Image (tube, rainbow, N blue to C red):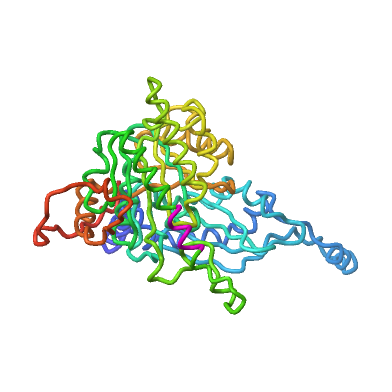
Amino acid sequence: MSGNWLLALALAVVAAVLVLRKLRPAWYWLTFGIMFAMVRVTFRYASVMDACGLTVPPSRLRLSLARMTTRPAPESRPPRILRIRATRTGLVLRLKLRPGQDAFDFVASTDRLRHSFSMQGITSREIKSGVIELRMTGYDVLKRVQMPAKIEREGLRIPVALREDGEVHFRDYRQVPHALNLGATESGKSVYQRQLVKELAPLDVALAGIDCKEGVELFPLARRFSALADNPDTAADMLDALVDRMTATYRIVRREQRISSDIPDAEITADIWGLPEHLRPVPIVLLVDEVAELALFANAAEKKRRERIITALVRLVQLGRAAGIYVEICGQRFGAELGDGITMLRAQLTGRTSHRVNDEASAKMAFGDISPDAVLAATQIPTDRPGTAVAGDSTGGWVRIRTPFTSLRQAVNICNANAYRTPDLPELAPFLPRLPAMSLAKVPAPAEAPASV
């Protein structure tokens, strides 16, 4: 009888584990998955590396010693494990390469390693010469996006999404000042933009927006914006005002450079971040929604307006970084068919993010000039996973990400709660959204975004 009870208990435990793995993969990984994965990697490591061609033959000295002592020939050697570490989403394996091995071999073998170790995904990167890191994912972290409870924020470096390797994807405006965000309808492009506004709202930064869809995306967030435009005519005037502010900021920097011989080199600056805090102009993030609406024209007057808009945008992305002006351009398509100046504008947009697109040509607009592999990845994003995107930069590196869902109400609540942070910029005063006064007692508390999409 006791044997039957033990068998029933064992079956119940197995069923509970399988249900946990299906419904709550993160909990399964933290309770059972780490242990199972550690055992697999430890016992399969040597044979997997040999099967994937990631070993080196024994040295001549070892072969000579084997012949002299009449011992069997030594086996090929895999890379040496320096460290294996468990994370909340997978394992991190740091390896020391053998002489003759190349880090590119491991990048090319990540898919085979994924199957061999029974992991969800594996990415490889070089830490330093001769040392690589294999970051293994134990489950599909993009299926149910769950951002870490504690995320380190610093300056204008904000979290916007979760990467496929379980790490947080950050948008660092000081490192990547300007970016392009592409995506078809219902791809999650607007949620990504909403996430940017939500994370920027509590910071000491001015927000400016151009939303030519009659303001339906950005105007609900207007209490946190210093300037908003909902049509191309207003957008042209606002961009000219931003160019004037950029010019005035450079005059401040030039006046305060302090390049006399008695000033230490560390105090000499060529941008706003080297200025004393009381003289530093507030940085501005410009969000442009549906950029194609700014480039289209139907008559001579609209063509003249278009040239004015594109010229101002090109100036801002070429010169705005040092003046603390950062540009985020969103659209469904962005290519040479939009007219003169578009290719020049795109060349200045270092950051690239592409959500699901309807054709390969759209993906090439984002990544065709930096990474063919990213183009292929962008065309394979499924329609049932809104918010999934491919993020890359001009260096050719790219990664799959997914933005946590943020409703418009949640973003509005956060913007309203941080409305007091909206700076008063004289240059942009004509474009300040006019809104009725709001009682502070009625300001809702910022709502946290749900953990999944």
> In the displayed structure, does residue 400 sit left or right of residue 188?
right
| Residue 258 in picture, x, y percent from top left | 54, 71
Residue depicted at 45% across the width and 36% down the height: 310
Choose between 319 and 443: the one closer to the eye: 319
> In the displayed structure, does residue 8 sit left or right of residue 304?
left
Instruction: Assess whether residue 35 is covered by the magenta stretch.
Output: no
Choose between 381 and 7: the one closer to the eye: 381
Check the image and report above or below for 9 versus 219. below
Choose between 174 and 182: the one closer to the eye: 174
| Residue 410 in picture, x, y percent from top left | 22, 51
Q: Quadrant of the image for the N terminus?
A: bottom left
Write down the region rendered in magenta: 247-254
| Residue 369 in picture, x, y percent from top left | 58, 37
Check the image and report above or below for 100 versus 238. below
Give the dominant element type of the magenta stretch: helix, strand or loop: helix
Residue depicted at 36% across the width and 37% down the height: 236
> In the displayed structure, does residue 428 sit left or right of residue 120?
left
Q: Quadrant of residue 103?
A: bottom right
Q: Quadrant of residue 138?
A: bottom left
Considering every residue shown, the one lying at the far right of the view is 68
Number of marks: 0
Q: Is residue 47 shown to the viewer in this render? A: yes
Considering every residue shown, the one lying at the far bottom of the view is 262
| Residue 56 in picture, x, y percent from top left | 75, 57
Q: Is residue 386 shown to the viewer in this render? A: no
